[in-house]
Amino acid sequence: MNNKVLQRLIAVLTTLESNPQGLSAASLARMTGYPEGLILDDLNRVSLYTDLGNHFLLYPDDVEDNPEEDWENEDIDSPVNYLVKDPQVKWNLSITTDPYPTLGLTPREVMTLLWLFAEFPPPGNLKSLQDTLIKKLLPGKEIAAAKEMSEKLYTRGGVTFGETHYLDKLRSALLNELKVQLKYYAKNSEQEVNWLLWPLGLIFHTGNGTWYLAAKKEKTREIVLCSLDRVRGVEVLKEEFIYPEDFSLRHYLRLRWGMDMSRPETVRIRFYNEANVVEKVQREFKARGLPEPAQLEDGSLEYCGKIHGIKNFAKWVLSFGSSAEVLEPEWLRNEMIRIARGWCEQYGDK
């Protein structure tokens, strides 16, 4: 915006502010000396296309709609349809000196802000600013609704966040990069273990409504995924650790099918070129950052590689029906055949 335009806007808005009864573009032209066409363009632009409404309210008197023009214009909601073209229409300006305008936030949005304020409190000299922001940005009724909602959070799938005794301890250790001593029931070995861990991330899985801790064992440097339902004790130590630069929680989860914590398995799968299966498989593997399956002469795909979360991967393969075939390992192939025969017995043509 150049200086001439800025000077014109200041003159127009200042004149409007000093005339609370409102002024038309024609009257503003006579009082400021600027052409009424330019003034009308400025008023339309400011009222429709800028975010200055957070600081003042600029609006014209009611303008009668022209039904014939509405029928001719397909996009009735376009801002173009709300342009004031008559220089005799009166404009009004209401300015607020409040530097913190109230925002129309949903209870869920307010709840997020409240959590951020509580989780990351500002230093003492900024506490008064935080209090002012809460009062101005979050109206009382929205704060009440948000607090009520936060008592029982819901995911999109309708799963509730249940009481998790150790969640706050682990979250604090994660944020402060403190080691934890974890007493845990390892389902694979069916025994209780004690691990010295570096917490790397907390994940809520909507599929089963369970929290998980991704962590690195200090002794072996192995990355483990622990279900908080099987945690038997947590001690947050005063000893710090350095979050590994080569670890990405997003990448770690992207490679996994679900939250299956079994050991990775090497598989060989054939996907046949039927019903867009090839495109779906290529898209899935690309999204996960996995090597692209080899394309065979008949157009089918063959994938040979390591899979994290074999149980959930097997469910995904089953979703393709006869368009996918497990070649290796033998135990998985036999399990898929057993499931397929069970389907045939239950749903097949007898």
Image (cartoon, grey):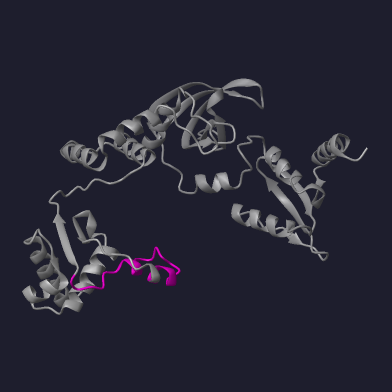
Residue 80 part of the magenta-drawn span: yes
**Disc count in the image?**
0
In this view of the protein, which residue sits in the foreground, 203 or 117?
A: 117
| Residue 335 relative to residue 187: left or right | right
In this view of the protein, which residue sits in the foreground, 206 or 88?
A: 88
Q: Quadrant of residue 291?
A: bottom right
Instruction: Relative to 6, say whether 279 is above or below.
Output: above
The percent coordinates of residue 111 (x first, y second) are 36, 36
- Can residue 111 be seen in the rendering of this structure? yes
Residue at coordinates 20% horizontally, 37% vertically from top-left?
131
The percent coordinates of residue 312 (x first, y second) are 68, 39
The N terminus, quarter of image: bottom left
- Can residue 292 be seen in the rendering of this structure? no
| Residue 68 relative to residue 303: left or right | left
In this view of the protein, which residue sits in the foreground, 188 or 315?
A: 315
Residue at coordinates 40% horizontally, 68% vertically from top-left?
70
Q: Which residues are magenta?
A: 69-88
In this view of the protein, which residue sits in the foreground, 40 or 265?
A: 40
The secondary structure that most of the magenta stretch takes on is loop
The percent coordinates of residue 323 (x first, y second) are 80, 52
Residue 189 part of the magenta-drawn span: no
Instruction: Relative to 10, say whether 300 is above or below.
Output: above
| Residue 82 relative to residue 38: left or right | right
Instruction: Relative to 62, say whether 316 is above or below.
Output: above
| Residue 283 relative to residue 24: left or right | right
The C terminus, quarter of image: top right
Q: Quadrant of residue 81?
A: bottom left
The percent coordinates of residue 310 (x first, y second) are 70, 40
Q: Quadrant of residue 86?
A: bottom left
